[in-house]
Image: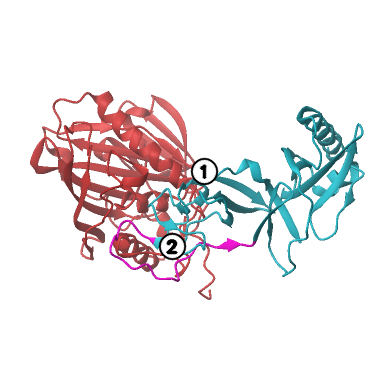
Amino acid sequence: MTTEPAALNQWYTLGACKDFGQGASARRLLGENLSVTRQGERFIVSASGRFLPVKTDFGHLWTSLGTPARGLFDMPEVKEVDRRHIYCGAVTVRASGLRLVENFLDLAHFPYVHSDILGIEDKPEVAKYEVEQRREVDELWATKCEFFQPKAAAASAGGQISQYMYRVVTPFNVILYKTSPNAPNRWDVIALFVQPVEPDLSIAHPFMLMIDETSSDAELIGFQQMIFLQDKIVLENQRPRLLPLQPGRETPTRADLSSVLYRRWLKEKELTYGTEERSDRVA
Amino acid sequence: MWVPIALGRDVPKGTTRAVIVEGRELALWRGESGSVQVWEDRCPHRGMRLSFGFVRGDSLNCLYHGWEYGTAASCRRIPAHPDLDVPSTIKARAFPVAEAAGMIWTRDSGEEPMPALPDARPLVSLAIEARPELVLMVSAAAPQGGAQIFADEVDGMTFHIGWHQVDDNKTMLHCTTRVAADPLLALGAMRALRERAERRAA
């Protein structure tokens, strides 16, 4: 178990509420075994006999091993009545949860990892986009992201230039707003909630709020799972498995602006869970 | 010391191969012109293992973002920035490489040249769950100077066997012969050697 406040004092999902059966089930978070008890729609979460705080926002069960300074982040689209709530399942990944978030923020891999779906090799360029740290809400935003996508979503009829916005709400939770093929003036919302099990082992819980009246649940889930399994091949084969924060360990370029800001933000928070040990700082 | 890490035949043109040598992950690849490279299995950009990459002509391209590396290990193209003149400081980590006696060799330290070895035919590579010392002990091996290779006689046939240590409990053997040999006989001999070494290690 970690004793690090920056990791403990955060909200983490343990999965979609609907995936918990009645009675007791076991989960693991930050190296600690948790017991979850469901009685009807009520959830009790405990660790070593200690009761932990519980929330059930966005259809997911949330808890914390510490004392979060703030409530859970907001996701107002969850209240829009015409959106489909799509739970994409839980995927275990042998990698740091921070690597998962960073990959989620990355545009440049689309033509290679998601070839002929989210990108094509003939159009690999990442146009300049903007990043900012919104200090009043303690969130990172990347805006004005654009990328040519031959099949941007399950409902796509053909290629499109997709617009993206990224919003990192906590070190392990990130939300993507993406051009909806069905509603040009609105955004589809794809969230990636990461449950850090160990520093180098994570469970990803992708969740989507889609504007799509035609695709079936199975089609929407299938599309997202195909994309995520392609990412998993990369994520489990990055070395080190932990995210390096030490300058010089990796080589960012202009396309990696959001990753640069994300790593700087993690350092500012003094978060080390899921990061590689550094040799450039004296304790 | 030069260490054989694969049979040359097992890295055909246009392919990559991942090999672990003394706990270090290495990527081997062979371009269309035929020369083989031994690199750290890690793209300097985001740490992706380069053995997952794809070979085109005489370049290795990282699977993650398509960064293209030439045979000198320098990155020469970053697809996300097509107009960028890639700084020469962006390089994969390359190790010395030699190809001799049917095997691909590398050297992690020292300066000695690759010793001259007679040509040999590749037979089989085989993993053994035992430390190299145990494997050498059971094989009545006669080591050959300067290179990690020994000769072993089985059923009247002489095999020239290179070896490298994978980790604390695993050894890879790369079996070759200098004359025409029956591959099944070689495989049988290597399996018998594996059985003896693993029994001893247990």
* Residue that carries the numbered disc 2 in the rendered image: B75
Foreground of the two, A140 or A126: A126
Q: Which residues are magenta?
A: B77-96
- Relative depth, front residue between B75 and B178: B178
Q: What is the CA distance from the residue labelled 1 to the residue labelled 2?
A: 51 Å
Q: Is residue B34 left or right of residue A17?
A: right
Which quadrant holds the C terminus of chain B?
Answer: top right
Q: Of the residues shown, which amino acid type is indicated by label 1?
A: Ser
Q: Position of residue B54 (x, y in %)?
A: 46, 46
Left or right: A35, with A190 as reference point: right
Residue A146 seen in the figure? yes
Assign the magenta stretch its main secondary structure.
Answer: loop
Label 1: which residue?
Answer: A48
Depth check: give the residue in front, A272 or B36: B36
Colour in which the image shows chain B: cyan
Q: Secondary structure at mark 2?
A: strand
* Chain A drawn colour: red
